[in-house]
Amino acid sequence: MRILHVITLAELGGAQSVVINLAERSLQDGDEVFVASSEHGEMWEVLNPEIHQIKIKKLKHSVGFDDILVLRELFSLRNKIKPDVIHLHSSKIGILGRLVFPAAKIIYTIHGFDSIRLRYRKFLPLEKILKSRCKAIVGVSNYDVENLKLEGITKNVHVIQNGIKDFAKNNFVSKDDLFSDLKKDQNTKIVLSISRLAPPKRFDVFCALAERMIEENILFVWIGNKTEEKNRPKNVILLGEKKDASKYYKNADIAVLFSNYEGLPMSLIEALCFSKPIIASNVGGNSELIDGNGALVFNNDLQEIQKTITFMLSNQNIYDKFAKQSRKIFEDLFNVEVMYNKYRELYSFIAKK
């Protein structure tokens, strides 16, 4: 089977992790796999070298005249590769790809429908117009699928929740504390958020919470920033971008994510893998990751978030119960094999047509 994945940006993020995992698993099954994306980005450095890499020079997130050249290059790929399955990821390439490739061969995964429904609503009419220009539309959470239906997008819609490799198996072996140089002493607790530093990810809430807890022996660590934010509380540590960021969950105590909207965040699935209790904004598919292993919160209720963190860290029995439940949720629902097998069924169905 010849499978072509196309995603707008090659920077590392949740959607790119899905592409990487699916592409590698398909390769293991003997498929010929192609990945096309923007010219620059960390994704290219971590993709298996046996996967064909196609860098589209003019492809970028913003909309402009260069998209005409992108369409031309996509037409060229269609004729050159002749893929059995075209898997489109992200909203922009979901639009461009559905204009170019044969509808009967397309799977379109929406990695967080709220980004369209709430933030870029001007593109929603295009989603509705093109809803039949593919064989399957995949939402990464039940939340997304329900909202797709509310917008009248109901045909050939599937739920396939994101999944990841079991990173914890290898990283649990090491006894090194990745935060040892940052801690005041062995009793210092780590509240960790792994996310890009962008307005929807609410670094401001993260800092405001840290400010409220500045007298406690807790460090608030953020991984994923490209810039250094100078105006922040002294207990907020920025570690920048890390290719292997997930391993830092091993030595963290609580995983947090305060967002305006989400699909099904990969960083929190990584926290589940490492048996970490979760505190997350009550948005998007976050609720599907929390079931007796943490708490959903509202970004404007800092007092309640602070109470929740204090409660978790001061009650060892509760903490241990949450940690064990996080790992169980990962094993049952969010490992890469569960995700891949569901996509594989769609690939096989489309390729036979």
Image (tube, helix red, strand yellow):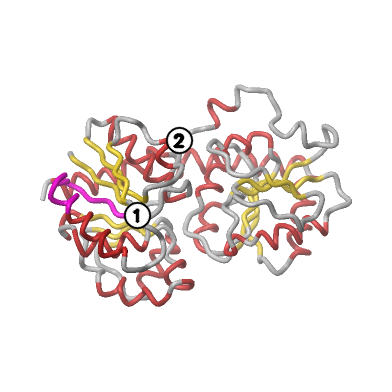
Mark 1 residue type: His
Q: Residue at x 12, y 46 (%)?
A: 352
Give the SS element for disc 1. Answer: strand
Identify the element where label 2 is drawn. Answer: loop
Nearer-the-camera pick, 60 or 92:
60
Where does the image place residue 307, in percent across and percent down from the top left?
78, 58
Q: Determine crowd level at label 2: few under 14, some 14-19, many 20+ residues with C-alpha closer than 10 A.
A: few
User: With 148 as the anchor, is 269 left or right in this view?
Assistant: right
Cα–Cα span, label 2 and label 1: 19 Å
Residue 108 in percent (x, y) is at 29, 57
The x, y position of residue 311, in whole percent, is 78, 51
Residue assigned mark 1: 89
Side of 103 where 215 appears, left or right: right
The quadrant of the rendering that contains the N terminus is top left
For the point 25% across and 74% down, which residue is it? 129
Residue 175, percent from left and from top: 68, 23
Query: Sequence order check: which comes first, mark 2 or mark 1?
Result: 1
Would residue 123 be counted in the magenta stretch?
no
Q: Which of 324 and 66 is in front in this view?
A: 66
Image check: 171 left or right of 152? Answer: right
- Report the residue at 89% width, 51% height from top: 215
Range drawn in magenta: 76-89
Question: Measured along the vertical axis of the image, is residue 40 above or below residue 281?
Answer: above
Q: Quadrant of residue 233?
A: bottom right
Instruction: State the residue position of label 2.
Output: 165
